Amino acid sequence: MEERYDPGAIESALQASWQSARTFAVQEDRTREKFYCLSMFPYPSGRLHMGHVRNYTIGDVISRYQRMLGKNVMQPMGWDAFGLPAENAAIENNIPPAEWTRSNIDYMRTQLQRLGFAYDWDRELATCDPQYYQWEQWFFTQLYDKGLVYRKTAVVNWDPIDQTVLANEQVIDGRGWRSGALVERREIPQWFLRITAYADELLGDLDDLEGWPEAVKTMQRNWIGRSEGLSLKFKLSDDNSFLEVFTTRPDTLYGATYMAVAPEHPLALTAAQHDPAIADFIASCATLSTAEAVVEKMEKRGMSLGITVDHPLTGEKIPVWVANFVLMSYGTGAVMSVPAHDQRDWEFATTYDLPIIPVVFPANGQIPDIAAGAYVEKGILKNSAEYDGLDYARAFEQITERLEAQGRAERKVQYRLRDWLVSRQRYWGCPIPVLYEEDGNIVPEAAARLPVKLPEQIEWQGVSSPLKSMPEFFDTTHPESGEPLTRETDTFDTFFESSWYFARFCCPDAKAMVDDRVEYWMPVDIYIGGIEHAVLHLLYARFFQKLMRDAGLMTAGEPFTRLLTQGMVCKETYFRDVGQGKPQYFSPAAVTVETDAKGRAIKAILTTDGEPVEIGSVEKMSKSKNNGVDPQVLIERYGADTVRLYTMFASPPDQTLEWSDSAVEGAFRFIRSLWRLTHKHVQKGACALLDSAILNADQKTLRRQIHETIDKVTDDISRRYKFNTAIAAVMELLNALTRSSDDSEQGRAVLQEGLETAVLLLAPIIPHCTDTLWRALGHDLEPLVDAGWPQVDRGALARDAVTIVVQVNGKKRAELSVAPDCAAEQMESMALADPNVERIIADKSVVKIVVVPGRLINIVVQ
RNA sequence: GCCGGGGUGGCGGAACUGGUAGACGCGCCAGACUCAAAAUCUGGUAUGGGUAACCAUGUGCGAGUUCGAUUCUCGCUCCCGGCACCA
């Protein structure tokens, strides 16, 4: 080995040899245990960012560790290639999305290879390739035949100037991001997948996902939002039709004082025909956002429709209002309002001076202050005629039974989850494989005519999808009858592609959607990706897995056995207030920070002009905050191993990582000191075999540290996924090895074992330099990627003495060093005899003594 | 607004099952080496008091449970993620 650590040379040579030897290509092998390690594939935005580096390093560490355990490890990589940014690039720079996307993929692929990730590149796929998306088109037609897809109208954000549909992200303060026009709500026919048919299964199966974080499962449960209640029909006072609502609280029925319907509700639209004020109100709701977060935060407004419904039990007339916060896409688009027992209803009733009638009271007899807010707990009924005095369960049952007998109610399970709207009015996506006859009849595309290829050679004019103005794309004829057909010009939501790619990776060249190789590899053993996907992507992928299972394509019902959600990568921001409301952000690389004697940042100046800039908060690396750190620059300066080591060391994978350039240098220093110590050791020539029976006390202590480190690191990597503490443990070991200067035969043998251990434990994290060190330590024949994970020698872990903490009233006052098997009575008397303890308890009496074996003694005094 | 997560030295973080708060690293300070610098090595580094032993305080804020709370419970606060067309 070279004396000097030169990452560039080592890494490129090793990566070339991995590539030529196809080290990470895998085949199904039923004699070996498989391990499928998957990281969420990237959107090819142009360059890798630190979030990618972090995500893929975590996956690579797990993959390489599993391989050292002897498993048949598959780690694939591909590209989530359809999406909005490619269209923006086309609009801004007139580059066709296909060309832009493919050149980004080529660049990012070289970046991933430069980081040394152990991917099986033979399995690479890009979702924009017809060979990939043809199968989801085929699958969609299958689902159509099963009745699991349907078409109905839904609201979109419509930009009246650009004449196009906008994504929520493209609507800023109610206006189109390019045109600045006030965005309108527009209803258009769109395609849906019936995910609600799987709601119960998606909910129930969460209980079996032991390898998923509780937080993600909770979010999915709340998202699905199963509730049991009643579908209730209120008869309109003036005619024989009914207003249908869903409620989980029939016990509060006597407190219903008004009904609220969505602006698009038929009752509201009918009332608007006769009342211009109502029509105006509904029109004013037309600029409402389709985003729930915006709707929930806006001012709650409404208007009486001037009609009433009959209360099913009292016959009283209840007014019907139209309200901007009731959404047509939720349930029936109408709600029964009980202001005394629902906070939102209470606020609306208070604003519009509607009656608030309390009908539920706490069981303990207290009277809640209804003037201050709604009482939302369950309790005992009052003001409810013959139901007074009943509790929630009895009231629910008795009121429900009566309404059922009247034919006014049906028990119903309702979900918050809505069917998945998969239509997008975009160009750069997978064409939806359906055709329409002249009268609107739907004809799914025949399997033999798939794929419906997205035309890639296009001229981009304006901002809306070129497909909408390409008759050569949408004008076609029926293959048998020859009658004219119009092709759907909408494309799929890009979540469609990412809902099944994990299955395609098992058999990327299959002559069907998947073949029987999925049975060997699926389910994914561990899936790694950002927490922001906790609900949507991860729920859709689970849904697709069940659809594929029910189509007979595979047997697994859940796609991901374990889930590791990664935190964001953040960095401090620097800016100047240049007026116009928006600060100007400067790259941290362009700023010089001055610190005080303690290292606190006190001032920052822009390096080029020497003038001060403000030090902002630590935020997620982004273009808008100009606080991104380009991985490429760091890889070129320090090598891939240092970047990998730092990202794994800086924080645990599920927490946010705050980027620090100087700490990166620390990671580089650590590798260099490991390199130096190994070099110094091997320069002295071969060493004797270790004989644990003849070690002296210091050698035994050092060897115990080696095996404690193996124990700790193994647990950290395999069970806890805490790579930062695993690395810290190896750093401690290296410090101990560096301090020992025992040149005796057995001293050198222990050092050899220590260095081999450090190299093996770090191999998954920094695979390049450890490969060189492994060979220098005398392992020329066995490649490090397939070296066995080190085993703990339990005998080496024995200790002669343990440290016991002595507390008085919970405060540490002394330490004792005792034999591990020391009796409790002896420890107590030693603790009481300690001079510092004696002094503190001198004028007090001992109440009791708590002994935690092997850890501490707490003397409680008064 | 709703759902989920988080707040520990100058900084990133550690403390895994309620048992020594601050492992490991960065930064900073001092020293060694050097003509000098870089690199490297050694020591120190929560805050306040004390020469020291040691003492007091301290894990966002306020309460509670406990012999003992960063860890459990309740209330609050600030920050972050998601909210169905960003991916």
Image: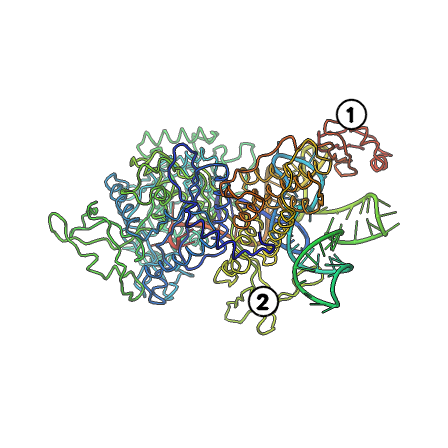
State the residue in front, A702 or A488. Answer: A702
Q: Chain of mark 1?
A: A
- Give residue A808's quadrant in the image: top right
Q: Nearer the viewer, residue A111 or A195?
A: A111
Q: Chain of mark 2?
A: A
SS label for mark 2: strand
**Position of the C terminus of chain A by quadrant:** top right
Q: Residue furthest front?
A: A685
Given contact means CB atoms under 8 Å apart, are the residues at marks 1 and 2 in contact? no
Residue designated by label 2:
A591
Occupied quadrant, residue A259: top left
| Callout 1 amino acid | Glu
Q: Nearer the viewer, residue A663 or A228?
A: A663
On the question of residue A371 being in view, the answer is no
- Relative side of B87 to A765, left or right: left
Residue where numbered disc 1 is placed: A825
- Same chain for mark 1 and mark 2? The answer is yes
* Image coords of residue B73 (percent x, y): 59, 37
Q: Is residue A663 left or right of residue A840?
A: left
Near-viewer residue (A261 or B32): B32
Q: Residue A210's spot in the image, x, y percent?
A: 48, 34
The x and y percentages for residue A407 are 30, 32
Q: Residue furthest left?
A: A481
Q: Amino acid at mark 2?
A: Val
As drawn, A410 above or below B9: above
For the residues labelled 1 and 2, the Cα–Cα distance comes to 63 Å
The outermost residue toward the bottom is A609
Label 1 SS: helix
Q: Is residue A86 above or below residue A677?
A: below
Q: Give the mark nearest the N terminus, 1 or 2.
A: 2
